[in-house]
C-alpha cells in the first residue's frame, strides 16, 4: 500500500474516533433536557469520559512501547463508539457513567498505538503526521454536528446510531493493518533516544496543558447550557 493511502486511511480513522471525544459535551444539553440532570450530574459524565481517557492513555502507551498491539485500533474505535451509543438508551445515571467511561477507555486505547502506526506508515514524514493529527481535530470539530443530526432528530433514544462512525473507522484501519503487518511486530521502545529527561520543562508544559484543558473543557461543556 502506498504511503499516502495509508496515512489518509489512518487520518480518517482518527477523525472517526475523535468524534467521540467531542460527542460527550455535545450530549450534555440533551441529558439535561430529557433527564433533568443537574450541572453536577453532567459534569460527572464529562469527568468520567475525560478522566478515563486521560489516565488510561499513558498506561496503553507504556504497553505499546513494549509490545505492538495493532488490534487496539479497531477494538478501541468500536469501544469508543459503543459507549457513546449506549449512553443515551439507559435511564440509569450509574450506567450512563459506565458507558461514557467505556468510551473513554476505547479512545485511550486507540491513540498511542495509532500514533505509532502512523509514524511507521508516514516513514518519518512530519507533514504526514500533521495530516494524521488534523484528522483527529476534524473529528472533534464535527462531533456536535453529528450529535445534533442524530439526537436532535429523535432524542436520546436515537443515540445507538452514533456507533456508525466507529464502525466506519474500524473498517478503514483494517487495510492499513494488513499492509503494515510485517512492520508491526515489535513495540517502539527500541527507537527511544538515550538521555536524561528534562523533568522541569516537562512539568511546565504539563501545567500549561492542564490550565488550557480546564478552560477548554469547562467552556465546551457548559456554554451551550
Image (cartoon, rainbow, N blue to C red):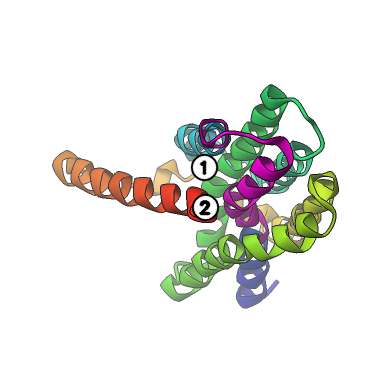
CA–CA distance between discs 1 and 2? 9 Å
| Magenta region, main secondary structure | helix
State the SS at label 1. loop
**Badge 2: how crowded within 10 Å, few (<14), some, or many (20+)?**
many
Residue found at the very far top of the displayed protein: 94
Q: Is residue 176 visible?
A: no
Give the residue displayed 51% in from the left and 31% down from the top. 40
- Number of numbered discs visible in the structure rendering: 2
Give the residue displayed 78% in from the left and 38% down from the top. 86
Task: Estimate the x, y position of residue 47 in percent, counting from the top left.
Answer: 50, 34
Give the residue displayed 60% in from the left and 69% down from the top. 7
Task: Estimate the x, y position of residue 174 in percent, counting from the top left.
Answer: 76, 56
Does the magenta segment cover residue 212?
Answer: no
Residue found at the very far left of the displayed protein: 200
Q: Is residue 82 visible?
A: yes
Q: Quadrant of residue 214?
A: top left
Give the residue displayed 57% in from the left and 33% down from the top. 38
Checking the image for residue 187, the label placed there is: 1
* Residue carrying label 2: 116
Q: Is residue 155 left or right of residue 5?
A: right
Q: In the rendered view, would you say 224 is above or below 76?
A: below
Task: Estimate the x, y position of residue 24 in percent, counting from the top left.
Answer: 61, 46
Q: In the rendered view, would you say 147 is above or below 38?
A: below
Q: Which residues are magenta?
A: 16-43
Residues marked 1 and 2 touching at CB (< 8 Å): yes
Q: Quadrant of residue 100?
A: top right
Work out which quarter of the rendered image holds the N terminus and state it.
bottom right
Does the magenta segment cover residue 17?
Answer: yes
Amino acid at each position: 500500500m502506498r504511503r499516502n493511502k495509508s496515512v489518509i486511511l489512518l487520518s480518517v480513522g482518527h477523525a472517526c474516533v475523535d468524534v467521540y471525544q467531542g460527542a460527550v459535551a455535545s450530549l450534555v444539553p440533551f441529558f439535561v433536557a430529557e433527564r433533568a440532570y443537574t450541572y453536577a450530574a453532567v459534569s460527572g459524565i464529562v469527568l468520567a469520559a475525560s478522566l478515563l481517557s486521560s489516565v488510561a492513555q499513558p498506561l496503553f502507551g507504556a504497553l505499546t512501547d513494549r509490545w505492538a498491539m495493532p488490534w487496539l485500533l479497531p477494538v478501541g474505535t468500536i469501544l469508543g463508539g459503543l459507549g457513546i451509543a449506549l449512553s443515551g438508551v439507559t435511564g440509569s445515571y450509574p450506567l450512563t457513567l459506565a458507558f461514557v467511561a467505556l468510551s473513554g477507555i476505547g479512545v485511550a486505547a486507540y491513540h498511542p498505538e495509532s500514533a505509532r502506526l502512523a509514524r511507521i506508515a508516514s516513514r518519518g514524514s512530519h507533514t504526514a503526521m500533521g495530516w494524521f493529527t488534523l484528522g483527529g481535530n476534524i473529528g472533534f470539530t464535527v462531533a456536535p454536528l453529528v450529535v445534533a443530526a442524530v439526537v436532535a432528530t429523535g432524542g436520546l433514544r436515537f443515540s445507538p446510531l452514533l456507533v456508525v462512525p466507529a464502525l466506519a473507522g474500524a473498517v478503514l484501519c483494517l487495510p492499513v493493518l494488513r499492509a503494515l503487518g510485517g512492520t508491526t511486530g515489535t513495540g517502539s521502545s527500541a527507537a527511544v533516544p538515550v538521555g536524561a529527561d528534562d523533568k522541569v520543562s516537562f512539568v511546565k508544559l504539563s501545567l500549561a496543558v492542564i490550565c488550557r484543558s480546564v478552560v477548554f473543557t469547562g467552556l465546551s461543556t457548559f456554554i451551550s447550557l
